[in-house]
Image (cartoon, rainbow, N blue to C red):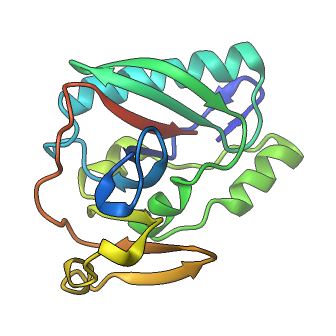
Amino acid sequence: MAADGQCVPLGLSRQLVGDPNFGASGYRYCGSILAPLIDPQFAHGHALFTGATALARCLASEFRLVGINGLDFIARDGVPYAVEVNPRWSASVEVAERAFGTRFFAAHAGACRTGELPAFDLATSLCDAPVVGKAVVYDATDFDRRQWDWLGGVEFPVGHMRVFFATRSYGPVTRYSQEVRLSYFF
């Protein structure tokens, strides 16, 4: 959340991109995972969080961003390399809302209307956050629903896609390379 050149971080999530398990290929977004910073999917999690926070503060100040904003970056060895800034609500926000049991829209409206920022401590919240994942399934013909059923997952049909949420870890996350694309929203 940003206003008056300041920002409050709200979430850090790993993007799922191009995963054929969800009917996606190339760079097509197919979900997000939010987890504690010590989770294996966040190599050098604390350093990554510190670097992403510094980037977000610089962006908020330099571009006078207001409301919820997203920062997508590639991480390598705990160092975030910015890819793009999205001065809008991002798809990963709903994963954080589920993980932290809160809604951010009122805070977004407050930042836009009055410049008020929420009192939210992401670093502390990520210490005991549950692993929450969201998958966008583009081609459900080869998708095995059973892999989500044991999680107590929730399914939402959206046009030709299905969106699934899971609230527990679903096992090891496939590492496609040492570079991981992440979203940081503030």
Looking at this rendering, what residue extends furthest in the right direction?
A: 113
Describe residue 16's horizontal placement relative to residue 93 as left or right. Answer: left
Depicted 171 relative to depicted 186: above or below:
below
Q: Residue at x 51, y 46 (%)?
A: 10
Q: Residue at x 33, y 51 (%)?
A: 19
Residue 89 percent across, percent down from the top left: 67, 49
Quarter-wise, where is residue 117 in the image?
top right
Q: Residue at x 11, y 54 (%)?
A: 172
Looking at this rendering, what residue extends furthest in the front direction?
A: 141
Residue 135 percent across, percent down from the top left: 40, 64
Describe residue 166's horizontal placement relative to residue 161 as left or right. Answer: left
Q: Quadrant of the C terminus?
A: top right
Judging depth in this view, the residue of 120 and 165 nearest the camera is: 165
Describe residue 178's horizontal placement relative to residue 32 as left or right. Answer: left
Residue 54 percent across, percent down from the top left: 47, 19
Q: Residue at x 64, y 41 (%)?
A: 1
Quarter-wise, where is residue 85 in the image?
top right
Judging depth in this view, the residue of 5 and 73 nearest the camera is: 73
Describe residue 139's horizontal placement relative to residue 143 as left or right. Answer: right
Judging depth in this view, the residue of 12 and 128 nearest the camera is: 12
